[in-house]
Image (spheres, rainbow, N blue to C red):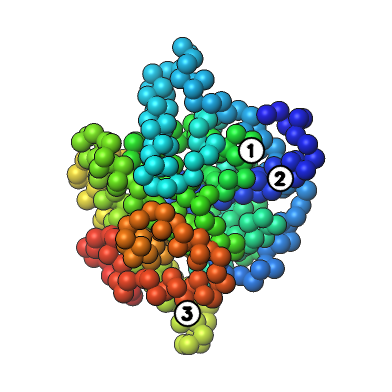
Amino acid sequence: MNARTVSLPRLFLVLATALLLGGCAQNGGIQNGGAQNGGAQNGDSPGAATHSGATLGYYWQALRGHLQIMTAARPLDEWLASPDTPQPLRARLQLAQQARNFAVTALALPDNASYRRYASLQRNAAVWNVVAAGPFSLTLHRWCFPVTGCIGYRGYYAEADARAEAARLAATGLEVSVYGVPAYSTLGYSNWLGGDPLLSTFIHWQEGDFVRLLFHELAHQVAYAKNDTAFNESYATAVERLGVQRWLGLHSSPAARAQFAASEQRRAQWRALTRATRERLSAIYESKEALALDHQSLTAMKSEAMQTFRADYEALRTRWLAGQTQPAQIAGLDRWVRNANNASFAAQGAYDDLVPAFVALFEREGSDWPRFHQAVQALARAPQAERDAAIRALMPDAPDEAPAVPGITASP
């Protein structure tokens, strides 16, 4: 649809949709050279970080960027019918159709217009997200919007704009991180425009990672709790992990399953490492008041924790490379580790920390997908305190989805 044909009420809806542009910030996992990143956990008061959240310039770039993606998308059948479509892309779009139908029939995910079109963006990310946190905190700075509520990231369609916002925040004393986002969910608000499209930024990922991201994005259209990014992202991550295992078991080749298993093993070890470091940093920051530590002491303890993290990653990396892992497969992790700070750790935690609770909920509901989604929807509607208590009650005493990494303990 051409932007000029959009009526005024729908123009406002498009704007609201565009403001969801960071609604799911996932950069592909280890297979694609990165770790799951993006999103945020809640923390600051709802009024925090609204100083520039309502600027016309930001709204305009969001509206323009989203409409450009929507108008670039064409139905999958058109791509498949075109003789100009390269064979690798044709095969992947056919796989996407199969996975999209599987999401509906096997996982009870929405049957709508989303991910039935494809857009070639000619860039390596759909948007770039900015996250920030204090020097002694794993609570993310937040921005507040009319539709999504307060979220711990701010998305831009131009990397330069994201880095300019990061520089502005860094000048105030915050630690910042900027990362590319290959896909985002508009929570179903774009379905009347043709739905969220498949994008060139992730279309060629290996099968398991491609399919799991598709399931993740669709899950955001099922349940969304305002002002609770950790809940939203952990639920979608649980859906992707449970869903991709079922897909691989029923539809993938042995080679695709082996490829995914190798990348998933790396991911599990990476999650164990970063979870241990988040717990250590959190304990350090929480000790500030109890032990009356000054900034110099806190800085020294934080520096030691970060040095340990980087040393443990280097040992893990050496073991990976001694196997069949290629340097290109972990290049994104190498960059993440070099630039790691409170902002990147806090953002990454939003995708992992509550996942065991949702897996437990899935099992409690008899592994029945409709019942599971309904239970999550009920939690999303509940007051925050009630929802938090329910999630805590579902959490196992010790997460066991990731194997231990030699030399890394879960607490300092």
Q: Secondary structure at mark 3?
A: helix
The residue at which mark 2 appears reads as: 13
Q: Badge 1: few (under 14), some or many (20 or more) residues near its Cα, within 10 Å?
A: few
Dot 2 or dot 3: first in sequence order is 2
- Which one is closest to the eye, mark 2 or mark 3? 2
Residue at image x 37%, y 24%? 91
Q: Are marks 1 and 3 in contact (CB under 8 Å)?
A: no
The residue at which mark 3 appears reads as: 286
How far apart in space, not on screen, are marks 2 and 1 (Cα)?
Answer: 10 Å
Residue 285 in the image, given as x and y percentages of width and height: 48, 76
- Report the quarter where the N terminus lies: top right
**Picture layout, residue 189 above or below residue 408:** above
> Can residue 122 be seen in the rendering of this structure?
no
Dot 2 or dot 1: first in sequence order is 2
Q: Are marks 2 and 1 in contact (CB under 8 Å)?
A: yes
The image's mark for residue 385 is: none
Between 339 and 37, the residue placed more toward the observer is 37
- Report the quarter where the C terminus lies: bottom left
Amino acid type shown at disc 2:
Leu
Amino acid type shown at disc 3:
Glu
How far apart in space, not on screen, are marks 1 and 3 (Cα)?
Answer: 47 Å
The image's mark for residue 192 is: 1
Between 394 and 271, the residue placed more toward the observer is 394
Residue 136 in the image, given as x and y percentages of width and height: 52, 72
> Can residue 146 be seen in the rendering of this structure?
yes
How far apart in space, not on screen, are marks 2 and 3 (Cα)?
Answer: 42 Å
Give the quadrant of residue 405.
bottom left
Residue 162 in the image, given as x and y percentages of width and height: 62, 47
Amino acid type shown at disc 1:
Trp
Give the quadrant of residue 188.
top right
Dot 1 or dot 3: first in sequence order is 1
